[in-house]
Image (cartoon, rainbow, N blue to C red):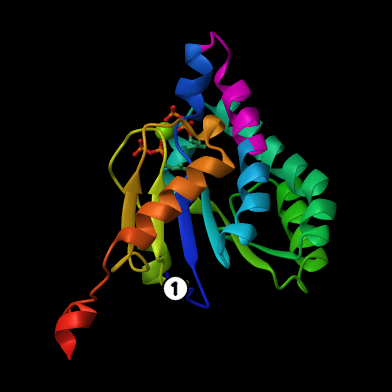
Amino acid sequence: MSQSTSLHVAVIMDGNGRWAARRGLPRAAGHRAGADAVRRIVEAAPDQGVTALTLFAFSADNWKRPASEVAALMRLFARHLQTETPRLLENGVRLDVVGRRDRLPAPLVAAIRAAERATAAGTRLRLRLAVDYSARAAIADRHILPDVDLLIRTGGEQRLSDFLLWECAYAELYFTEIMWPDFAAADLADALRAFHARQRRFGGLPEAAAG
Ligand code: IPE
Ligand code: IPE
Ligand code: MG
């Protein structure tokens, strides 16, 4: 298996609410469990050859949700950034948050700035968290990220929901029924195994036929 120098994995982290509902828990409990899954995957990713990881945490359309759920998510993001920063530093992770900031609560904006500054020297993993993100808006504003190699969506839906539409032009797509809070390092390994077994052609011919 040829080891490429860069590997950009993007994840639509879906299924927190259903994970909670199945356990008779409030949706917010699903989001908290989802934050634990983020920690696990961020820590597992570099050892699996991932050099860049972009995680969809909150879409521009998620403002349509009840104010109480939105507020709980915004608090969770701010708290997660604060508590995780030391671990990100230890693990050589550089964090950037992508998406609009002007609609986010001030304490979250402050937590984002602090986490970005603290981790700016990280070189082992480029972690991007998409918050209040819309791919259509990003394209219109010319905020384009590096091409995605592998796009994973958990939670069973097979759609992009306005995530990285430009960057996924040649991404390999991987959909799994696993709910995001249950997604573990072994599941990331499964997705990467499937990815490495695929033949990417980018419109050309398979290597053997290209002569
Ligand atoms: C994904 O889980 C997290 C966010 C969109 C914030 P959901 O909250 O969409 O969970 P489901 O799809 O309702 O199960
Ligand atoms: C996509 O999930 C957004 C995130 C995971 C942050 P949604 O749950 O919002 O997407 P739809 O509504 O099923 O398309
Ligand atoms: Mg969902």
Q: State the quadrant of the N terminus.
A: bottom left
User: What residue is pinned by disc 1?
Assistant: 144
Q: State the quadrant of the C terminus.
A: bottom left
Write the start and end of the magenta stretch as one range.
Answer: 23-36
Rendering coords of residue 133 (x, y %):
48, 54
Q: Nearer the viewer, residue 42 or 209?
A: 209
Element marked by disc 1: loop
Residue at left offset 33%, top offset 59%:
197
Q: Quadrant of residue 25?
A: top right
Q: Is residue 101 visible?
A: no
Q: Would you place residue 177 above or below residue 107 in this image?
A: above
Q: Would you place residue 56 above or below residue 32 in this image?
A: below
Indicate yes or no whether the magenta region holds residue 29.
Answer: yes
Rendering coords of residue 83 (x, y %):
82, 44
Rendering coords of residue 189 (x, y %):
50, 49
Rendering coords of residue 74 (x, y %):
65, 39
Indicate yes or no whether the magenta region holds residue 174.
Answer: no
Amino acid type for the residue under numbered disc 1: Ile
- The image quadrant in which ligand 2 is located: top left
Q: Residue furthest bottom?
A: 211
Q: Would you place residue 168 above or below residue 209 in this image?
A: above
Q: Considering the whole magenta stretch, tell me its main secondary structure.
A: helix
Q: Nearer the viewer, residue 47 or 35?
A: 47
Question: How many residues crowd around disc 1 within 10 Å: few (fewer than 14), some, or many (20 or more)?
Answer: some
Residue at left offset 23%, top offset 81%:
207
Q: Indicate if the residue with disc 1 has its beta carbon within 8 Å of ligand 2.
A: no
